[in-house]
């Protein structure tokens, strides 16, 4: 597996407040702001932070974790095939998000959610 970046996704009640904390006190900058999330980054080797809006409609056990460790990889389709063949606990199958990411989630034996992503730009029309 070729990991090219790492992200820690945190599900929080107030995305804007957490973003202000990370940018004011820890040197992060807002790389992408969306209605439901804010992506934070730094120019050094620190992992990126993704702040996700907690939904009141997401009950415990719904697959919406408070912490997700995310790795950007190359050739996610091959990794998905390998993980399936190895019998990994895939909890969200490979799918395409509207903003251009391909995503798969798996969960380790202790409940840690791991997400693999690959950015594939939309085809130019």
Image (cartoon, rainbow, N blue to C red):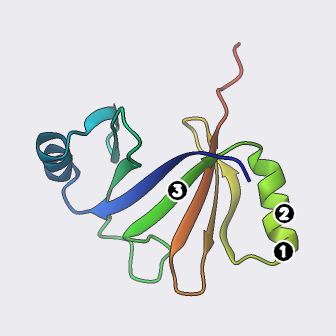
Q: Nearer the viewer, residue 39 or 53?
A: 39
- Residue bearing the label numbered 2: 82
Q: Nearer the viewer, residue 120 or 46?
A: 46
- Mark earlier in primary sequence (2, 3): 3
Q: Would you call the spot at circle 1 few (<14 residues within 10 Å), some (14-19), or many (20 or more)?
A: few
Q: Nearer the viewer, residue 100 or 3?
A: 3
- Residue bearing the label numbered 1: 86
Q: Residue at x 74, y 54 (%)?
A: 1
Up the image or down, 74 lies above or below 43; here it is: below
- Residue bearing the label numbered 3: 70
Report how far apart the C-alphas of labels 2 and 1 lie in the structure.
Answer: 6 Å
Q: Residue at x 74, y 49 (%)?
A: 76
Up the image or down, 50 lies above or below 43; here it is: below
Report how far apart the C-alphas of labels 2 and 3 lie in the structure.
Answer: 18 Å
Q: Secondary structure at mark 2?
A: helix
Are the residues at dot 2 and dot 1 in contact (C-beta closer than 8 Å)?
yes
- Mark earlier in primary sequence (3, 1): 3
């Amino acid at each position: 597996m070729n990991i090219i970046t790492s992200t820690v996704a945190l599900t929080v009640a107030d995305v804007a407040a957490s973003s202000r904390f990370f940018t004011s006190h820890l040197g992060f900058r807002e790389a992408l702001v969306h209605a439901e999330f804010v992506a934070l980054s730094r120019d050094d080797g620190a992992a990126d932070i993704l702040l996700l809006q907690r939904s009141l409609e997401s009950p415990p056990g719904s697959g919406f974790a408070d912490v997700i460790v995310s790795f950007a990889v190359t050739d996610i389709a091959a990794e998905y095939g390998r993980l399936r063949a190895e019998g990994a606990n895939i909890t969200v199958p490979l799918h395409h998000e509207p903003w251009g990411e391909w995503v798969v989630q798996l969960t380790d034996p202790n409940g840690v959610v791991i997400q693999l992503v690959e950015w594939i730009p939309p085809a130019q029309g």
